[in-house]
Structures are given as C-alpha cells and as structure tokens.
C-alpha cells in the first residue's frame, strides 16, 4: 500500500505541476464558455437571419382553396402554369414547387433544385396538413374564427405527489451534462494513462521501476494518481467558472446601473414578469443536490477506475500508439453505447427497463446512472449500482494486472487478442 501511495503521489504532483495542466485548468472554463457561447450565438443568428423560401403551389383542383398563409420560413404563391413554375425553380426564381394536381390530401409532390432539408420537409407537411384540416372544418360550417376559438394553449405545471415541481427540463439538462463530463474525462485521462504506460515501456524506464515495486502496485498508483488529477482539474473548473460568472455579473451590473439610477432600476425590475425565472428557481429547488454530488463523485471515480485499468492493460501490451486503435474501440464501445442510451432511452423514460438495467451494468452505469440520478432515483438503487461498479472494477483490475505484469516487459512482438488471452491464463 505504501508503494501505491508513493506512485500515486508522484503521478499526481508530476502531472499537476506541468505547464499544460496549469494552462488548461485556467483556460478551461473560458474555452468551454466560448464554445457554448459561440454555439448559442450561431443558433440565434441562424434563427433570426434565415431567409424565407419562395414556394409555388400548383393547385388546379383548388384543393387548398387559395387560403394558405405565409409563414416565417415560406412565402407561398399560386401558379396556373406548372411548366413555367418548374422553369422558375431551375432558374432559381422559386425555391420549391408543390404539385397538388392529383387532388389527394395524402400525397403531393415537392420539386426543388437542391435537396430539401428535413426541417423544411416537416414544416411544409405541418402547414399543408393544418390547411387541409381547416378546410375540412370549414366545409362543415365552421369559420376560421370559430376554429381558432376552439384551439387552446395549455400550460402544463407538472408536479410530484409530494407537491414538488417535477423539473423535467432542468433534470434532463443537469443529468446529461454530468454524464457527458464523466464520459469526456474517462476518455481524456484514460488515454493519458495508456500513452504514459506505453511511453515508459518504450523508454525502458519501467524496467527500473519494476525492480522496486510490483507491477500491480505500479498500475494502481498510476490509475489513482491520474484519477485525482482529473478530479482536481474538474473541481478547479467549477470554482473558476463560479468566479468568472460572478465577475461578469458584477461588471455588467456596474456598467448597466450607476448609483444615481439605482432607485429607478429597482423600480423597473419590480415590474418585470418573473414567471419564467420563478419556474427555473422552483425547478432548481426541487433537485437533491447532495445526491447529485455524491452520485457524480462515485460514478466519476468508479467509471474512471474501471476503464483506466483496461486502458493501462492496453498500454502495457502494445509498443506504439498506432497499435492501440484496434484495442481501444472494443473497450470504449460500451461507454459510447451508454451515452447513446442516455440520449435516447433515458431522456424519453428514465424509469424504463432499458434505462434501469443499463444503469446497473458496470460498463454503462457511469453515464446512464448519472442521467437518471436527477429523476428521483432512490439512494438504495444508486448505491447498489455503485457497489456493482466498484465490485466489477476489482475483478477487471485483477485481470488487467495479469496482462500488465507480462505485457509491460514484453518487447518486439505485435500484441493480439490471442496473446493477451495467453497472458490471462498464465500461472505464477
């Protein structure tokens, strides 16, 4: 245990003192903020600067009765000459041509010079379906005003049996962000361990180290040391992000409001409708942050320990980075599969059978359980999943150490699955 602690301490201090670690720790929150800020700015720009498409409608049977209205994305006009409209599409004067000459409410042809996007196709389908629906109701004696009066905007205020807000949107966002961070750090620092082991093996430094410590102690010390490096960087990012947001808030507040207009600003703020902000605060208050923090730490460490032991075994078996690709893919597939399940099954129904079982399987639980945690998963279920994860780590690290102790001193032969299986079955 003493040797493991010494290697852990060396790995931690060596990596934390590197300039690259310090620079990324300081710039990480800023880069992440710029990344998501640029995505938001691009999305906002696309939504506000998108040009409407000119759409010709060829409707000789008057199925739409000439009543279709323009939208933010489409500008409609009717044409009586189909051939001319097709030529206009070819010349670029018209973007789309909708042919309703068959007088069918179920089938119509859309002609375009370039491929139609999925979004445009769905929007057109919805606009045309609504128009047909309104026409059918009008044929039965209902006017447009009467039809509109029958439509109601429903605001759903969902709550649990205990009276708390279900906070579906906030829970989905926080769960997925936490899962993605775990996914990202497992890959980033797992690959760091693998390359570090391969580099020490190629430099023959490991031969000197093995003379003083056992291979298992060396592997565990590396895994635990790098795990602490990852956790340290993540905590530093959280703290720096909080400070950065505070500074930005104070700076903008000081710029926007001077002392002479403070009274007026407070009066104006009191008149602002805080309904949306109130809903967000109510959703945040319904979250069990203690469970989220404990769960994140448990599954961050557990997932990292499980996968990093496999990455360390791969690093010890190969002689170069190019050989790692054939082994990394099957090892990383369960984690990628877990992220896919989190995006599809868990967000749709966090208590479905697929979601529950995937949060218990150790190779997918670090990601899937993190997405499920905000959705009122019990402490018993969370701790049971964590126990399976850490128990699996003990088994996996035992097998990985058998590969590590032989592979770390094996040179001159290309690693293969067959060779690794032989190392696993070797005695002594």
Image (cartoon, rainbow, N blue to C red):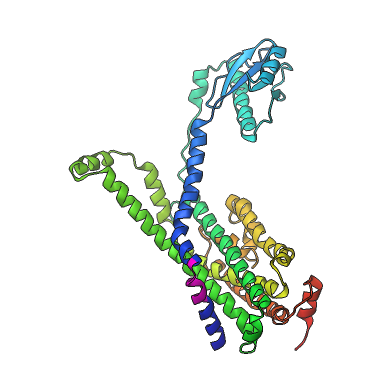
Furthest residue in direction top, as rendered: 80
Look at the picture and state if 272 lies above or below 379: above
| Residue 122 location, quadrant | top right
Q: Nearer the viewer, residue 124 or 183?
A: 183
Quarter of the picture containing the C terminus is bottom right
Look at the picture and state if 208 lies above or below 252: below
**Residue 6 among magenta residues:** no
**Residue 16 among magenta residues:** yes
| Residue 188 location, quadrant | bottom right
Residue 393, x across and y down, in percent: 63, 74
Look at the picture and state if 42 lies above or below 360: above
| Range of residues picked out in magenta | 12-19
Specify the principal SS of the magenta part: helix
Residue 235, x across and y down, in percent: 45, 66
| Residue 95 location, quadrant | top right
Q: Is residue 353 visible?
A: no
Residue 355, x across and y down, in percent: 62, 58
Q: Is residue 404 left or right of residue 302?
A: right
């Amino acid at each position: 245990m003493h040797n493991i602690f010494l290697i852990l301490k060396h790995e931690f201090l060596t990596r934390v003192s590197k300039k690259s670690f310090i620079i990324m720790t300081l710039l990480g929150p800023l880069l992440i903020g710029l990344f998501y800020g640029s995505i938001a700015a691009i999305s906002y720009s696309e939504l506000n600067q998108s040009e409407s498409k000119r759409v010709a409608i060829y409707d000789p049977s008057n199925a739409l009765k000439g009543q279709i209205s323009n939208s933010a994305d489409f500008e409609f006009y009717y044409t009586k000459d189909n051939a001319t409209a097709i030529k206009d599409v070819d010349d670029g004067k018209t973007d789309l041509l909708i042919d309703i000459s068959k007088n069918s409410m179920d089938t119509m042809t859309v002609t375009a010079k370039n491929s139609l996007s999925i979004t445009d196709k769905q929007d057109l389908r919805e606009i045309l379906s609504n128009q047909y629906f309104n026409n059918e109701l009008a044929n039965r004696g209902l006017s447009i005003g009467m039809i509109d009066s029958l439509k109601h905007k429903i605001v759903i205020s969902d709550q649990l049996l205990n009276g708390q807000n279900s906070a579906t949107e906030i829970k989905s966002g926080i769960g997925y962000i936490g899962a993605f961070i775990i996914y990202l750090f497992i890959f980033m620092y797992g690959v760091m361990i693998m390359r570090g082991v391969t580099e020490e093996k190629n430099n023959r430094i490991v031969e000197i180290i093995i003379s003083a410590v056992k291979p298992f102690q060396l592997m565990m010390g590396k895994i635990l040391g790098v795990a602490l490096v990852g956790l340290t960087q993540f905590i530093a990012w959280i703290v720096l992000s909080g400070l950065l947001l505070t500074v930005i808030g104070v700076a903008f507040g000081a710029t926007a409001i001077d002392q002479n207009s403070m009274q007026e600003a407070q009066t104006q703020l009191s008149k602002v409708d805080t309904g949306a902000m109130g809903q967000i605060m109510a959703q945040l208050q319904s979250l069990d942050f203690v469970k989220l923090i404990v769960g994140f730490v448990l599954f961050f460490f557990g997932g990292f320990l499980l996968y990093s032991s496999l990455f360390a075994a791969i690093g010890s078996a190969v002689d170069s980075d190019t050989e790692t690709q054939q082994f990394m893919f099957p090892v990383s597939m369960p984690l990628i599969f877990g992220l896919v399940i989190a995006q599809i099954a868990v967000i749709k129904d966090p208590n479905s059978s697929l979601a529950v079982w995937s949060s218990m399987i150790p190779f997918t639980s670090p990601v899937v359980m993190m997405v499920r945690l905000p959705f009122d998963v019990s402490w018993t279920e969370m701790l049971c999943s964590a126990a399976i994860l850490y128990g699996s780590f003990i088994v996996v690290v035992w097998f990985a150490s058998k590969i590590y102790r032989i592979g770390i001193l094996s040179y001159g032969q290309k690693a293969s699955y067959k060779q690794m299986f032989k190392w696993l079955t070797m005695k002594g």
